[in-house]
Amino acid sequence: MSVHLRLGGPLTIPAMGPCFMCQRDYLAVVAVGELTRNCGPGHEAIEIPLYACGVCEGILTLLLADALRSPVRPYVPAGHPH
Ligand SMILES: [Zn+2]
């Protein structure tokens, strides 16, 4: 099972519904990604869209920004030495 987040993408169409982060319902939410599970013995593949409210989308965006600012591994520029 894996979670794919696509923050601020072109598919962020506002809708009304529950937020997967804060569990509140009947909020203006946007699609921020999906939860997926590959098929295998005993279970079928699933793909569930994840919706988050504006507040939680902001939190996720901040988490992403923090992760990019202090990466776990040092950034190595693309290219090859000559
Ligand atoms: Zn929320």
Image (spheres, rainbow, N blue to C red):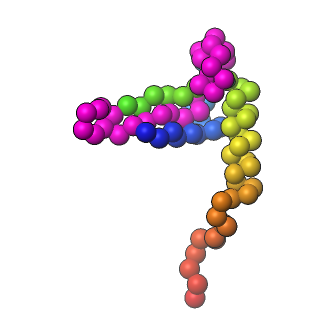
On whether residue 59 falls in the magenta region, the answer is: no
* Horizontal relation, residue 50 to residue 76: left or right: left
- Judged from the image, the quadrant occupied by ligand 1 is top right
Question: Which is nearer the eye, 68 or 80?
Answer: 68
Q: Residue at x 68, y 46 (%)?
A: 64
Residue 29 percent across, percent down from the top left? 64, 21
Asked where in the image residue 1 lies, by quadrant, the reply is top left
- Quarter of the image with the C terminus is bottom right
24 in magenta: yes
Position above or below: 17 against 62: above
Q: Which residues are magenta?
A: 16-45
Q: Residue at x 47, y 41 (%)?
A: 2
For this view, does 2 lie left or right of residue 81? left
Q: Is residue 58 above or below residue 29?
A: below
Position in image of residue 37 (x %, y %): 39, 37
> Which image quarter: residue 69?
bottom right
Vertical placement of residue 41 versus 55, above or below: below
Residue 33 vs 15, above or below: the answer is below
**Residue lying furthest left in this view?**
41
| Residue 45 rendering spot, x and y as whole percentages | 33, 34
